[in-house]
Amino acid sequence: MAGLDQPLELARALIRCPSVTPEDAGALDVLQAALEELGFTCHRVRGEAPNTAPIDNLYARLGAAAPNFCFAGHTDVVPAGDKGGWREEPFGAEVRDGKLYGRGACDMKGAIAAFVAATARFVAKHADGWNGSISLLITGDEEGPAVNGTRKLLDWLEARGERIDVCLVGEPTNPEQLGDMIKIGRRGSLNARLSVTGTQGHAAYPQLADNPLPRLIAMLGLLSAARLDQGSTHFQPSNIEITSIDVGNRAANVIPARAEAAFNIRFNDSHSSASLTAWLHEQFDSVGGAYELDIEVTGEAFLTPPGELSALISNAVEAATGRVPELSTTGGTSDARFIKDHCAVAEFGLIGRTMHKTDEFVELAALDALTEIYEEILRRYF
């Protein structure tokens, strides 16, 4: 692919691959061809686990020496949804009025194209070499269950004794303008399903039944009234959100035997999933009665404290945009939650206003500016 030092054509080629999780749809082939043209050694790593779809992933490295600077991201995207809501074809990668449209334009195929273009520029300016390596760690399982993607790639790297020294994840971190925000951590996320059991019976004879609903309501009341913390140095307060209440009872004169609710806790570094699980059981035990609590933890809270990595990115952003980015831990989670166990990690990418929406787009000027920032990061790092 010609012109790899410019991000647009690679971004368009990636967007044209309808790589909705778990489908790759040729996206990694497109990326691998571009990286091999630049001299990268590429490895395809297939992640597999029971009851999940297998996923193709890519690790590519240019150079063999330390330190190893890694760009991380994902080529999978969320579904386009109702195509009738799009003015442009979701996977057409059309350019109109200075914007590139398509699913994944900002989350995050545009950033991946900027990874490659920045590296191409850096390598061209350092034809005599530099002290270190540049790598890309790219998964096809970030928007899905995240079981067979980045975690499997990191396990594969560890098994072969390969080390990443520092990592930049290209998620769309900026709320409004390029240069607004760097993510230096993320809150943890705990999903829970609470099932309260009783004895079914006739509403006219409550003494012959055991209604689980008052107990469920009392348990959820404790959650609604709880204030887990006031926030911490780098994190906003933790929050509990009740997301579903389900009885499945169509008859108004029948006391149900079971009532269920679902809720999510986004928690800061004042807690762990283990401490929250213990707290939940304490709350529900205080109400009494039989219940079941099923918990899924998608990530613990983590932080890369402000330091060399955040300063490196911040200085490069300021040099390119004139803005000093906020260091933040807001929002959902990302694959940085896995990478943080291996090296220092931070996130910086495009503007996220249209991610997961119809008519997702990236401004061409922002795509070029992000490439400039990534190149400046490489220059300052090496």
Image (cartoon, rainbow, N blue to C red):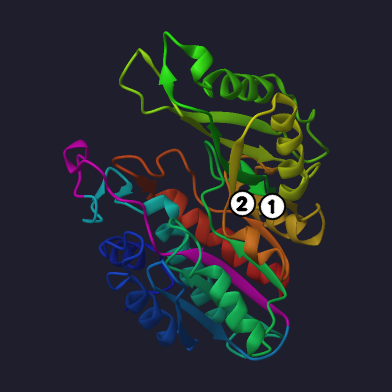
Farthest residue, direction top: 204
Q: Is 270 situated left or right of 218 in this image?
A: right
- Residue 135 in the image: above or below residue 79: below
Q: Which mark is in front, 2 or 1?
A: 2
Farthest residue, direction left: 84
Asked whether residue 71 is drawn in magenta, I would say yes
Classify the position of the C terminus by image quarter. Answer: bottom right
**What is the secondary structure assignment of the residue under circle 1?**
loop
x%, y% of residue 276?
73, 41
- Residue 311 in the image: above or below residue 115: above
| Residue at 81%, 41% in the rendered image | 270
- Asked whether disc 2 touches disc 1, contact meaning CB atoms under 8 Å apart, the reply is yes
Q: What amino acid type is highlighted by mark number 1?
A: Glu
x%, y% of residue 129?
63, 89
Q: Is 381 situated left or right of 338 in this image?
A: right
Residue range of the region highlighted in magenta in the rendering:
67-89
Q: Nearer the viewer, residue 123 or 17?
A: 17
Mark carried by residue 297:
2
Asked whether residue 303 is drawn in magenta, I would say no
Q: Is 114 situated left or right of 236 in this image?
A: left
Residue designated by label 1: 300
Q: Nearer the viewer, residue 162 or 40?
A: 162
Can you see residue 122?
A: no
Q: What amino acid type is highlighted by mark number 2?
A: Val
Q: Estimate how packed mark 2 is, as few (under 14), some (14 to 19) or many (20 or more) residues with alpha carbons within 10 Å.
A: some
Can you see residue 370?
A: yes
- Residue 124 in the image: above or below residue 272: below
- Residue 125 in the image: above or below residue 183: below
**What is the secondary structure assignment of the residue under circle 2?**
strand
x%, y% of residue 301?
71, 49
Q: Nearer the viewer, residue 253 or 109?
A: 253
